Image (cartoon, grey):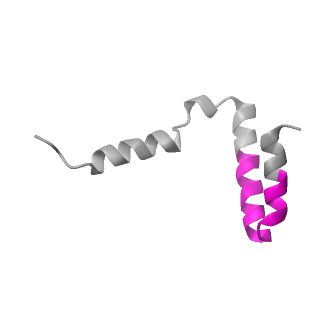
Amino acid sequence: MDALAGKLDAKLREWTPETAAQVRQHVAEVIALADQGVLDIMRSRAIEQEVLDLLDAPVSR
């Protein structure tokens, strides 16, 4: 089993049932998007955060 899948499996057993259910839902959504081949056109949250950080940065002159 892939190391990531093993870690996810272990965490799902550790988290509260509510948290585990939310994670399962998000993972299912990502799998569905990957199956549709649309992940590459989605905006990465990390990139989105970088842009927000740049907008919040003080202007230097």
As drawn, is 30 to the left or to the right of 45? Answer: right
Q: Residue furthest right?
A: 1
Residue 34 lies in the magenta stretch? no
The residue under the point 77% across, 42% down is 4
> Percent position (x, y) of residue 21?
77, 63
The residue under the point 80% across, 70% down is 17
The residue under the point 74% across, 48% down is 27
Please tell me in which quadrant of the rendered image residue 23 appears: bottom right
> Percent position (x, y) of residue 49?
43, 46
Please tell me in which quadrant of the rendered image residue 38 appears: top right
Quarter holding the N terminus is top right
Magenta residues span: 9-29
As drawn, is 2 to the left or to the right of 26? Answer: right
Q: Give whichever of 27, 37 is nearer the camera.
A: 27
Q: Give whichever of 35, 61 is nearer the camera.
A: 61
> Percent position (x, y) of residue 58?
21, 49
